Each structure stands twice: as structure tokens, then as C-alpha cells.
Image: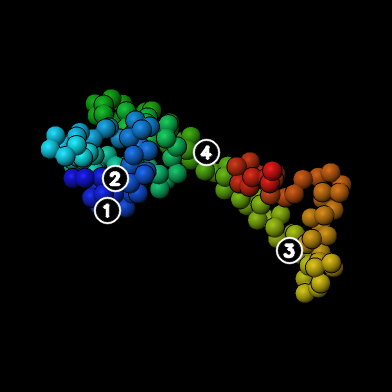
Amino acid sequence: MKIGELAKQTGCPVETIRYYEHEGLLPPAGRNPANNYREYGAAHLERLVFIRRCRTLEMTRQEIRELLHARAAPNDSCTSINSLIDEHITHVQTRVAELKALEQQLIQLRRQCQAAHTNRDCGILRSLDNSVADGSTAPAQHHSGLAKPLA
């Protein structure tokens, strides 16, 4: 099948398939000698579906590489897979805690303005201005990886 058909069957954009090939997550497709188009087979489809499932779990490219490596060695112990998932769970738990802290900061910020005012009198804007004036950072910048500071 051509790359467009693979993309259609997996719901994965063509550019992403090419990226996965470039990154070594998906083996390069063979070329059809008649038209030089890339030809993908059932193994590509199966592997791409696996990669996509991993991505829905927000696994990194490195984690996916490790899982693909383990998948290629079916008789090895799955201890490394368990460890990888345990580490990923810890990472997710950290992110959940950061998001909960961010939620609390936003709730506290929202409490600064309970009624409609002019923007000049808005407690939220005043609070954000005061945090800049007193040298503290904006609430969203306290969370690594959740919000990027404006440059």
C-alpha cells in the first residue's frame, strides 16, 4: 500500500509517518520498481498502530523505541517493560500534581475579581501586575513543561 493508504488506515498524517521513518521508529518502506513509490506492508501497518497506541499514552520516542526493542525479543523477560511503565506512571503522577497546583492558582486568581468591573479595576489584572512588580513570576510559570514563558 502507498503512504496515503497507510495514513488513512491508521489515522496518522503522512508527515508523521515520514517522521517516524526518519526517527527509526518505523522501518523504511521498500520502493516499487515500476513507479518508485514507497510500498508499505502489513508489518508497517501493525507497527504504526502500536506506535500510535503508545503515543496516545503520551510515551516519548525513547520509551517507544524501548518497547519496540522489547517487542522484537519475545522470549526476554518483561522486567524492563514493567520498569518503563512504572517510570511513566510516576511522570504522569507528577504532571497531574502540577496541573492540580495550577488549577488552585487559577482558582485563587479568579477570586481576585468576583464581579464585572472595568479592566482598570480588574482584580485579576491587578494581581498579575503586582506579581510582576514585586519580582515574583506569573503563576503559570511555576509549572515545568505546562506553560512556556513569553519571550
The residue nearer to you, when weighing 43 against 102, is 43
Q: Residues within 10 Å of mark 4 (few under 14, many from 20)?
A: few
Which residue type carries mark 1?
Lys
Q: Residue at x 61, y 46 (%)?
A: 146
Q: Secondary structure at mark 1?
A: helix
Left-right relation of 61 to 41: right
Q: Which residue is mark 2?
A: 49
C-alpha distance separating marks 2 and 3: 42 Å
- Looking at this rendering, what residue extends furthest in the left direction? 34
Which residue type carries mark 2?
Val
C-alpha distance separating marks 4 and 2: 25 Å
Q: Residue at x 36, y 44 (%)?
A: 15
Q: Secondary structure at mark 3?
A: helix
Which residue type carries mark 3?
Arg
- Above or below, 28 relative to 96: above
Q: Are the residues flagged by discs 2 and 3 in contact, CB closer than 8 Å?
A: no
State which tag comes first along the sequence, 4 or 2: 2
C-alpha distance separating marks 3 and 4: 30 Å
State which tag comes first along the sequence, 3 or 1: 1
State which tag comes first along the sequence, 3 or 4: 4
Q: Which residue is mark 4?
A: 90
